[in-house]
Image (cartoon, helix red, strand yellow):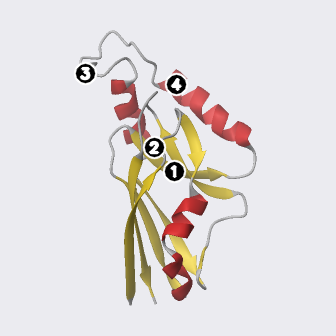
Amino acid sequence: MKFYQTEIRLKSQRRGFHLITEEVLQALPEIKHINIGQLQVFIKHTSASLTINENADPSVRTDFESHINKMVPENAPYYIHTYEGPDDMPAHIKASLMGASVQIPISNGRLNLGVWQGIYLCEHRDRGGSRSVVITAFGN
């Protein structure tokens, strides 16, 4: 079994949902040496998250942002953790709902994603800054 791991820093993104599949693939070209395995992508933050979804139509990412903001609004009167602004506590809740990692099968040296699937960075803060992501691939 082979194991490869790297950590990258993604550039700062505006609030919203952003495709990062290409950055992940560029950061760990050793994936091509794995015939059968798994790729895990883990974000080291509590106010941003990762998910897999539509990679072609950008309106899907816009709709994700609109919907999650309705689900988890800012300025809820019961939020106590508001030290960093009105987007702070909602960002933590959104990150927990979406998740801190994704796992993708590797087949014949390639990610075995569906035709229309890509990895999203879900930035839940207005000014979240750059984000650290740990990328681990393993298999035979």
Residue that appears at 43% across and 30% down: 127
Above or below for 50 versus 47: below
Asked if disc 1 and disc 2 are in contact, CB closer than 8 Å, the reply is yes
CA–CA distance between discs 3 and 1? 25 Å
Which mark is drawn over residue 69? 4
Query: Horizontally, is 76 left or right of 108 in the view?
Result: left
CA–CA distance in space, label 3 to label 2:
20 Å
| SS label for mark 3 | loop
Q: Amino acid at mark 3?
A: His
Q: Which residue is mark 2?
A: 98
Q: Earlier in the sequence, mark 3 or mark 1?
A: 1
Question: Where does label 3 land, which residue?
Answer: 81
Location of residue 26 in the rendering, given as x and y in whole percent from the top left corner? 55, 68
The residue wearing badge 1 is 51
Q: Earlier in the sequence, mark 3 or mark 4?
A: 4
Q: In percent of the image, x 48 and y 41: which residue is there?
A: 12
> Left or right: 137 with respect to 59?
left
Percent x, y for residue 133?
40, 56
- Secondary structure of the residue carrying tag 1 is strand
Disc 4 crowd rating (10 Å Cα; few below 14, some 14-19, many 20+) is some
Given the image, on which type of amino acid does mark 4 rest? Asn
Left or right: where does residue 72 sit relative to residue 81? Answer: right
